[in-house]
Amino acid sequence: MDKINALKSLLAIPKDIVITSHRNPDGDAIGSSLGLKHYLEQLGHTVKVVFPSEFPNFLGWMQGAGDIIIYDVSPEEAKSALEKPDLVFCLDFNSLERIDKMGELIGYLKCPKVLIDHHLFPEPFADFELHDITASSTSELVYDFIILLADKQHLNKTIAECLFTGILTDTGSFKYATSPKLFRLVADLLELGVDDTRIQNLVFNCMEEKHLRLLGYVLNTRMEILEEYRTAIISLSKQDYEKYTIQRGDTEGLVNYLLMMKNVTMAAFIHEQPTITKISLRSKGDFSVQEIARQHFKGGGHKNASGGYSYIGLRPTIKKFKSILPEYQQALLNNDL
Ligand code: 5GP
Ligand code: MN
């Protein structure tokens, strides 16, 4: 409580604030960052949202998305925003390694840092932490943060739309990490004017024809099922990205299709990026992919959704992933839903 009061005093005077979130920002990274930005602007602060890399087009409709500074696209502008802010918010990640080169810049800053996050194992780099691994999303925690600061009256439709989007995407349309508290909170967001069906359409029903065809093609030709491990894998090479002109955002959510199969407990999407091979892991029930991502792929995340990467290339990464499956076979087979 003392810390919240200290933060409230800090926020009582207009400040230059930077909000940042993880690389490959998703709906929760953007929703929580923009929701917080709109709230802080109402308090009279000057707020810049800076991300390490680009976000998918289907989130571009959110108010304020056009003003987000992307380090990969405009490094000078990003560096200048990070030169001497009065306060930095780190949302939806908890280790500075997750924000690439920006991590070093933020590590050097002397100003107070606030962490709002729901991932396991936070690194101790922040002065204020709102951290709860039982929260559905960082957007849920931004709502809690505004309530903790006794500022419920500052919530409005714009903030609510951003937070709703983050909750919607991180829960996979209210399929994971829900709670009675979350549904009450979402009811508040709807009372603030959120049109939930409209946002569902903006986020999930906005594919271009080529995306749906790509999905069909990839499921048909790149899906491998390892029945004895209740595991399914989709892999894409650099050549696939070039040949089918696939952009990074185009494969967002692909991994989730694998879990639609009754006998699949773990899903992996392994794909080559310019310098790394990225692995996205998903699971059902009590089987945790967090440990696999952390121990074998330098990553982390949540029990049912984690990710990591390797520098060994696509084929060796697939091979490595398959080689660790026997260790988890019993857990995969015993996992009751
Ligand atoms: P995705 O598979 O959608 O990229 O990420 C799913 C979740 O895994 C993210 O919310 C994030 O928590 C985690 N994650 C993905 N990639 C990494 C990574 O490289 N490092 C860590 N620590 N977590 C990751
Ligand atoms: Mn999140």
Image (spheres, grey):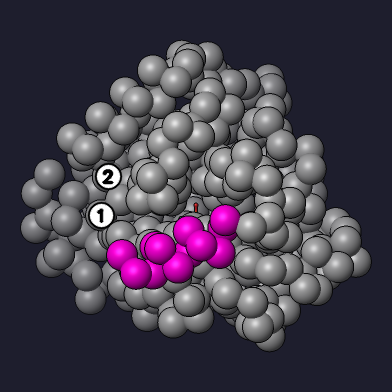
Say what secondary structure mark 2 lies in: loop
User: For disc 1, does the CB lie below 8 Å from ligand 2?
Assistant: no
* Residue 6 in view here: yes
Q: Which residues are magenta?
A: 1-12
The disc, 1 or 2, on the residue closer to the chain's N-terminal end is 1
Q: Residue 14 magenta-drawn?
A: no
Q: Which residue is mark 1?
A: 134
Q: Which residue is mark 2?
A: 177
Q: Which mark is residue 190?
A: none
**Residues tagged 1 and 2 counted as in contact (Cβ below 8 A):** yes
Please report the residue visible at 57 percent of the width from the left and 41 percent of the height from the top: 39
* Viewer-side residue, 16 vs 92: 16
Seen from the viewer's position, the closer of residues 251 and 154 is 154
Q: State the separation of the CA atoms marked 1 and 2.
A: 7 Å
Q: Main secondary structure of the magenta part?
A: helix
Task: Point out the frontmost of discs 1 and 2.
Answer: 1
Q: Residue 88 occupies which quadrant of the picture?
A: bottom right
Q: Percent x, y for residue 312?
A: 60, 79
- Disc 1 residue type (three-letter): Thr
Q: Residue at x 19, y 66 (%)?
A: 329
Tell me: 245 left or right of 195: right
Name which residue lies at 43% across and 45% down.
Answer: 146
